[in-house]
Image (cartoon, rainbow, N blue to C red):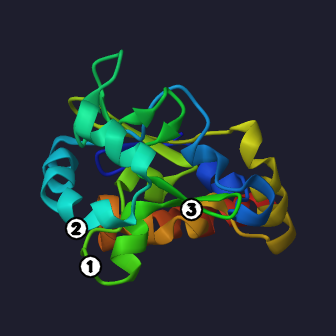
């Protein structure tokens, strides 16, 4: 672990390799698990605002879940998250054949909304936990992402580079530039 501003960062994001491999996992992170995507307070307001524009991109099951539960929910642990369809798929999931995609991101890609998706989804496999004085930035190892780990290894792409855009979105350009400096120093010590 190392400190970067008001964050405590796991070295795993420098050390581990990762590149999403949708052809292998089919977007399993959007349909597996026991909770929706983590949200922050600001994102709940965004979801409420953009839902009418995103709704045409969603499946009828997703629309029904959102209209029954709301555009966001408080999970069993009290955290804010996206609603689920029958405690499985994220309500915002759509499918391209067998592959799960984000309906919000599809609306974004078509210029309908200017918000890509929840930052927690954009950051994955990085998970951020906010505390009073700092945020913990960790790598989340999940077996459904084994193919992504293998592809990242093959292409030699560390986690922090794979999620660069999302890390900048969450922490800013300056923070990411400092992270790259730490990564270069870490790389030097590793090669000795």
Task: Give percent across and percent down for residue 58.
Answer: 40, 58
Residue 84 horizontal side relative to residue 190, left or right: left
Mark 3 secondary-structure assignment? helix
Mark 1 secondary-structure assignment? loop
Of callouts 1 and 3, which one flags the residue occurring earlier in the amino acid sequence?
1
The label shown at residue 58 is none
In three-dimensional space, the C-alpha distance between marks 1 and 3, rounded to whole angstroms, equals 29 Å
Residue situated furthest top in the rendering: 76
In three-dimensional space, the C-alpha distance between marks 1 and 2, rounded to whole angstroms, equals 7 Å
**In this orientation, which residue lies closer to the viewer: 84 or 175?**
84
Residue 185, picture quadrant: bottom right
Of callouts 2 and 3, which one flags the residue occurring earlier in the amino acid sequence?
2
Q: Residue at x 22, y 33 (%)?
A: 133
| Residue where numbered disc 1 is placed | 112
Q: Residue at x 32, y 66 (%)?
A: 56
Please name which of the two marks, 2 or 3, marks the residue nearer to the observer.
Answer: 2
In three-dimensional space, the C-alpha distance between marks 2 and 3, rounded to whole angstroms, equals 32 Å
10 Å crowding of disc 3: few (<14), some (14-19), many (20+): many
């Amino acid at each position: 672990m190392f400190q970067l501003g008001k964050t405590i960062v796991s070295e795993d994001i420098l050390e581990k390799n990762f590149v999403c491999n949708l052809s292998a996992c089919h977007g399993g992170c959007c349909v597996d698990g026991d909770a929706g995507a983590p949200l922050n307070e600001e994102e709940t307001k965004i979801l409420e605002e953009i839902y009418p524009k995103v709704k045409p991109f969603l499946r009828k099951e997703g629309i029904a879940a959102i209209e029954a539960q709301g555009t966001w929910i408080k999970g069993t642990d009290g955290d804010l998250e996206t609603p689920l369809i029958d405690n499985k798929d994220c309500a915002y999931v759509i499918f391209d054949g067998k592959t799960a995609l984000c309906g919000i991101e599809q609306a974004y890609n078509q210029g309908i909304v200017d918000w890509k998706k929840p930052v927690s989804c954009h950051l994955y496999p990085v998970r951020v936990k906010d505390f009073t004085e700092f945020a913990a930035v960790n790598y989340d190892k999940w077996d459904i992402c084994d193919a992504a780990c293998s592809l990242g290894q093959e292409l030699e792409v560390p986690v922090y580079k794979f999620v660069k855009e999302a890390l900048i979105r969450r922490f800013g350009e300056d923070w990411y530039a400092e992270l790259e400096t730490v990564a270069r120093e870490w790389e030097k010590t590793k090669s000795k």
